[in-house]
Image (tube, rainbow, N blue to C red):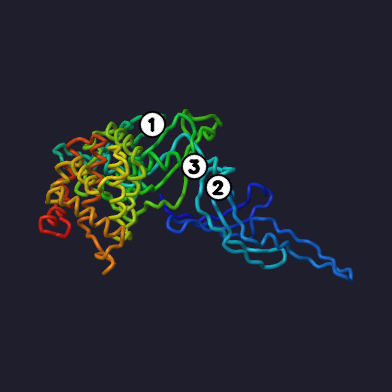
């Protein structure tokens, strides 16, 4: 999916359906949207001012020149409806008494439907193109044969076979979590021809629910899991909402089975990375098969629901490439503190080093290999580093820097292994993580006596 839009059409406010303004809408995932209007959204109100001599002076109502917020703007571009959400005026320039140009900032976009109110943005299905999911699922229906190289005299250079594969499913509460395959022909059949395969995520609920209920819970939890597994940010490359009120219709005007029209949703996702290169087996820490397939997904979702805020705080250290090292350490340290308190129901007043030791015990052998010292010594180092940062103690005050990359990575993998243990991840997951090149490098740093090792 393209992360940018450049659209020309008519735009209007729902309460002013008879006042449609031509304009250009631009969208990028980094900057959001800007609507450039050859006019203004609110109808211009010109009033008469009667002067003492009886003459009439025309003037524009000034209350319309104040800063305007537009919860919803509707648009139509080549027959497609657009809903622009959470908008506000950036500038308004008067060209004449009855003519203006307006510039509006847009935070979110719906392509394919007109919604009246942002709080009614709901549906019973969400379909997400999750970056790197195809590589992580690691199941293919594509194969190639080259008959020309056989002894039968066949002159066919290549035969590409594309088979449809069954959808992978697991039930979580009243929502079905699915990974499904899609196949698409590419090329013009003259210069080139190929088949593109993609695995996507879909969430199917029994009844319509707010979009945020999908995105902030199950979608986010799957994104976090895939990001941990592949070692890269699993962007939401495309998000489509589906609603039972918008069935896909045949040419004859009747619904086509259980199919729905897609309502594409654009937003500035905070968990976003520029890297688009596909992941390879060498890149990944573990695969879906290592996790135990969709049953493993179900167990993960159950645990992630309990520790969602801790998980989000830790994953922010992965999703934010420019985060200071000290902030990475503090985020993960705080999450581990809360994780142990919730898991063991110990209350708030417990020595931090003891909490870390219990986390190390839970993580097990792969993590002990990563610290290369006894857990008690490492836990005390983790406590002192956290306290130095949290209380701006002398060691941090002198040069404004404390901690090291190794310790930050150790904390991250301690949390990741702990939450995977609670999700009953099979031994193959931890074996695969332990054998990854990055973990081997970190173990080498620890053995070399890096600070905190």
Q: Is residue 320 above or below residue 435?
A: below
Q: CA distance from mark 3 to mark 1?
A: 19 Å
Q: Tag 3, which secondary structure?
A: strand
Q: Position of residue 2 (x, y in %)?
A: 42, 52
Inspect this view and state whether residue 186 appears: yes
- On residue 83, the disc is 2
Q: Circle 2: is it few (<14), some (14-19), or many (20+) Cα within 10 Å? A: many
Q: Tag 1, which secondary structure?
A: strand
Circles 1 and 2: CB distance less than 8 Å? no
* Direction from residue 130 to residue 383 in the image, left or right: left
Q: Tag 2, which secondary structure?
A: strand
State the image quarter where residue 345 is shown.
Answer: top left
Q: For the residues carrying marks 1 and 2, which lies nearer the camera in this image?
A: 1
Q: CA distance from mark 1 to mark 2?
A: 28 Å
- On residue 263, the disc is 3
Nearest the camera: 237 or 391? 391
Q: Is residue 402 above or below residue 292?
A: below
Question: Residue under circle 1?
Answer: 176
Residue at point 15% right, 39% down? Answer: 150
Residue at point 54% right, 49% down? Answer: 85
Q: Position of residue 342 (x, y in %)?
A: 31, 39
């Amino acid at each position: 999916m393209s992360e940018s839009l450049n659209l020309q059409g008519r735009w209007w406010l729902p309460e002013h359906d008879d006042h449609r303004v031509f304009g250009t809408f631009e969208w990028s995932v980094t900057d959001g949207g800007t609507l450039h209007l050859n006019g203004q959204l609110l109808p211009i109100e010109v009033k008469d001012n009667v002067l003492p001599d009886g003459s009439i002076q025309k003037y524009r109502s000034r209350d319309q020149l104040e800063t305007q917020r537009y919860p919803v703007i509707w648009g139509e571009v080549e027959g497609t409806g657009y809903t622009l959400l959470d908008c506000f005026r950036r500038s308004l320039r008067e060209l004449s008494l009855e003519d203006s140009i307006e510039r509006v900032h847009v935070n979110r976009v719906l392509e394919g439907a007109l919604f009246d109110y942002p709080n009614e943005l709901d549906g019973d299905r969400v379909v997400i193109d999750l970056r790197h999911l195809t590589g992580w699922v690691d199941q293919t229906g594509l194969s190639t044969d080259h008959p020309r190289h056989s002894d039968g005299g066949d002159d066919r250079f290549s035969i590409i076979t594309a088979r449809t594969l069954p959808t992978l499913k697991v039930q979580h509460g009243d929502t079905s979590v699915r990974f499904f395959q899609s196949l698409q022909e590419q090329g013009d059949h003259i210069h080139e021809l190929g088949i593109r395969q993609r695995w996507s995520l879909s969430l199917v609920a029994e009844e319509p629910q707010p979009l945020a209920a999908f995105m902030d819970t199950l979608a986010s939890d799957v994104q976090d899991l895939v990001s941990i597994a592949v070692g890269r940010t699993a962007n939401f490359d495309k998000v489509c909402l589906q609603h039972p009120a918008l069935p896909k219709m045949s040419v004859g005007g009747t619904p086509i089975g259980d199919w729905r029209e897609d309502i594409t949703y654009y937003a500035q996702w905070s968990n976003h990375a520029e890297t688009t290169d596909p992941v390879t087996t060498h890149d990944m820490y573990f695969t879906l098969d290592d996790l135990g397939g969709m049953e493993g997904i179900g167990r993960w979702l159950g645990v992630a629901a309990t520790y969602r805020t801790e998980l989000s705080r830790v994953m922010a250290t992965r999703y934010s490439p420019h985060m200071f090292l000290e902030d990475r350490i503090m985020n993960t340290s705080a999450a581990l503190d809360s994780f142990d308190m919730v898991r063991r129901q110990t209350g708030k007043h417990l020595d931090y080093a003891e909490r870390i030791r219990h986390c190390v015990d839970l993580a097990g052998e792969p993590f002990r290999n990563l610290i290369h010292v006894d857990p008690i010594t490492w836990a005390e180092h983790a406590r002192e580093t956290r306290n130095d940062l949290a209380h701006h103690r002398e060691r941090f005050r002198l040069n404004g820097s404390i901690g090291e990359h190794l310790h930050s990575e150790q904390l991250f993998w301690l949390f990741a292994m702990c939450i995977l243990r609670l999700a009953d991840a099979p031994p193959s997951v931890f074996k695969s993580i332990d054998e990854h090149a990055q973990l081997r490098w970190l173990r080498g740093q620890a053995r070399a006596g890096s600070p905190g090792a």
